[in-house]
Amino acid sequence: MAGSMRLVARPDTWELRVFVGRDSLRKIKHRYVRFRGTKRQAERELARLVSEQEAKPAPIVETELKWNSTTTINDAIVAWRDNGWADLSPSTTRRYESLWKVKIKDSIGRRRISSLSSYDVEKYLRSLKDEGLAEASVRQVRAVLGRACRLARKWSGGALPNPIADTEMPSWSIDSHTPVRAPSLDEVQRLLIASQSLDPRISCILRLIVATGMRRGEACAIRWDDCDLILGTVRIDESIVSNKGSATVKSPKTRASIRSVAIDEGTLGEFLRLREIQENLAQHADIALDADAFVFSFEPGGLAPPHPDSISHGFMKARARSQIARDIHLHSLRHFQATALDAVISEKQKQSRLGWTNAVMARHYTDAVPEEDRRAAKHIGRLLGGGTATDADLGEPQVTQSVESD
């Protein structure tokens, strides 16, 4: 109800109440006005106040949060959301929002920060484990709580404690960790063959991910001017992240993620075929295919990048058609690259090719593609083409389980 009224003093004093919105904690706010006059006059004044409020462009009234003994975990998270989340990537904020609403808001989020002890927090984290939440998710919940309480302590001038600081995570048995399985060469070949019956953009991007170990978001961000179709190289300097139904261009995951990689002749052929398709689509739409157009865009002209989820859905279709195991995921293709190159190039060059931080800090992204990387591309191309590696490639690698640490 937008407004209401009640008689507070006889014979003619009324209290008029007008709904004005919700504050930052989603609590309902009203405006109260005392009015002297007849009931009919009070009704008219109430209607005028309601109309006046509805005409205002910003009906939500924000209240300043008081940092004291009544401040709850939810208060701290909301304050952090309003003053900090804008600096995070869209995927990170979505994850934080989900963890807060599903696991925190209606449980420990209601507790006052000043009343929480390390015991309370560790008991809560253990309850999440007992519910079946994975270790990584419990760790993220603890990270959200820790960051919110750390900020609350700072913003309160040290008046509030940080009950998360001295807490420990529950322990998981080693058997509870399932390592990511790198697909076998046969599974990868069947997947790529099955993808040929899908959209050419899907088949080409899956080939690129297999051939280079590129991350999904990195592959989605490739533009035509990142590709040297003569030298056979692809430059990675952007990434695409999901953002509430849309796709957003951002910087890569780390500084080391900015790199150039060589591609094999088979993958280069896929790019040349896709280039022809994209040029024809742009021509039929009477628009130009600019150099900075996204290679795997589903729009004529390539102005919009593909949504990362569309690539994942395409992968799942190809997986179903190839009848490979469901424990193979899109990210597993990156593990295939990591294991397939073990016997071909040095560990440092493999980490450089995959964009891992810990081995390539000194390497500038404008460096030329080294010969070792070209040897890696040729080796992968022979594998995907059904050929065998030669002695010059240092032998056929054994594709086994691999745990990646980006």
Image (spheres, grey):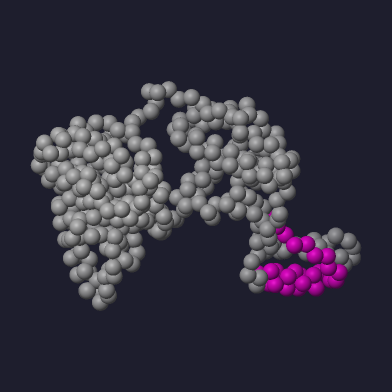
Quarter of the figure with the N terminus: bottom right
| Residue at (27% x, 63% y) in the render | 224
In the rendered structure, does residue 34 fall within the stretch colored magenta?
A: yes
Residue that extends furthest to the right in the rendered view of this protein: 10
Q: What range is drawn magenta here?
A: 28-54
Residue 57 higher or lower than 107, as above or below = below
Return the x and y of residue 329 as percentages of the image width and height: 29, 41
| Residue at (34% x, 46% y) in the render | 355
Return the x and y of residue 286 as percentages of the image width and height: 25, 77
| 239 or 66, nearer to the observer | 239
Whether residue 143 sits left or right of residue 249 in the image: it is right
Question: On the image, which quarter does residue 235 sit in?
Answer: bottom left
| Residue at (32% x, 51% y) in the render | 259
| 34 or 315, nearer to the observer | 315
Return the x and y of residue 295 as percentages of the image width and height: 27, 61
| Residue at (45% x, 25% y) in the render | 172
Whether residue 349 sits left or right of residue 140 in the image: it is left
Whether residue 158 sits left or right of residue 229 in the image: it is right
Question: On the image, which quarter does residue 117 sit in?
Answer: top right
